[in-house]
Amino acid sequence: MHGSATRALQCIRNGEYIAPMTETTSDSLTSAEAATPEGMARATELPSQRNELSTWRERLAGIEVLEDATFDDELVALLQQDAEVRALQPIRFSTPTFKEYASSEIQGCGKNSFPAFSVTAGACALDCDHCKAKILEPMIPATTPEMLDQKVRDLILMQGLQGFLLSGGSNRRNEIKYEKYYPVIERLKRDHPDLKIAIHSALLDEPRARLMESAGVDTAMMDVIGAEETIREVYHLDRPVADFEATLAALCATRMEVVPHIVVGLHYGQIVGEANALDICARHNIHSLVLVVIMPFYAKAGTFVTPATGDVGRIFREARRRLPDRPVNLGCARPPGMHKRIVDAYAVMAGLDGIAFPADGAVAVADAIGRPYSQAHACCSIKVGGTKVRGAASCAA
């Protein structure tokens, strides 16, 4: 005999629980039951403390910044079922310092502790349809070895730099010639052994991978594309999928930590080669995988569509299932606004291990489903310090 009573809902802001809202529920207590100590304790429980009476979808409804979000209920239920089989691990929120960042839940870091450098400044010969070299714009130009050396040393001295990402635009074969920078990397690693260096490798062979390793690079990153038509039409590149897997194999034959990236929706916003790309990554001894989502506003108007958030969430689920024992992270690039909030919520629920520049609501979702979290002011592909947080994090760089 259950009458109409109230149940506390979870409302989260800035990573902290605030005054509960109430909602009438069919599984509520009677007035007599609510008056007992046990009843009063149950009435004020958070949903995460009463898993058997609160689905993840119900918990999402109690998060203020997601109140206008449209979730795929079937997918959310599947993700919750997965979590009951595979316990969710702590999640890492990365806030690299190569761009300004702040959300309502966590803060970025004012120090330039892990910047990105481009050896070609803003130039790229491929001019891929999805990027148009725009991703290079926030990076610090370092078009000569001397420029890189001086800028890195200045940042170590003035801002406590802990590491950096070396990148650049590709040539027509999707290669980046880093060889002249390797002596600088060797000297920097000799003088600063704890400095962490990551590099976007582009396509290469085993001898060039060995040179990269011997210079002292800690982490090598590359894009893995699983469809020939995507390479040809989006990248304007006449090279097969096999060349991407060969590059991954060459990198994995070194001692570097190898972190491939997969762009979800790379084929003009459609899901085409992602499953094959996941299979390629699963076949090799990678350190971790980074997923990003196509950002159509970089492209010519009308050429790309924005992938549906549910489709992106299903890729996250497949990535977690196919690489159960290796870290899978959500990288920097993804569409902004509510799309990003929903995608980040799926990433948290799917059990991804990290999110770069998390959207408003990501911390709330982690709290709602009981996932501890930490923050690090570094690229999601490389670990440089970190601060345990339950709300806004301080700058730990």
Image: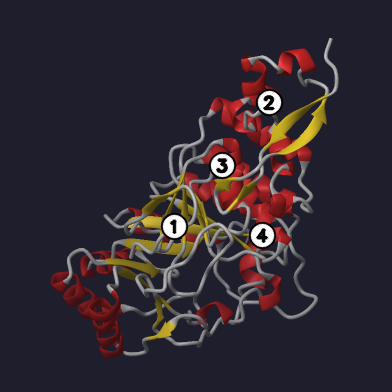
Nearest to N terminus: mark 2 or mark 4:
2
Q: Is mark 2 in CB contact (under 8 Å) with mark 4?
A: no
Q: The disc labelled 2 sits on which kind of residue?
A: Ala
Q: Secondary structure at mark 4?
A: helix
Q: Which residue is mark 2?
A: 43
Tell me the distance, in whole angstroms, between the alpha carbons under discs 3 and 2. 19 Å
- Nearer the N terminus, badge 3 or badge 1? 3
What residue is pinned by disc 1? 393
Judged by depth in the image, the label closer to the viewer, 3 or 2, is: 2
Tell me which amino acid carries mark 3: Asp
Circle 3 sits on which residue?
367
Q: CA distance from mark 2 to mark 4?
A: 33 Å
| Residue 109 screen position, x and y as percent | 42, 69
Q: For the residue labelled by badge 3, is the local secondary structure a helix, a strand or a loop?
A: helix
Q: Secondary structure at mark 1?
A: loop
Q: Is residue 31 above or below residue 236?
A: above
Q: Position of residue 370 (x, y in %)?
A: 54, 36
Asked if residue 92 is positioned above or below residue 56 in the image, the reply reads: below
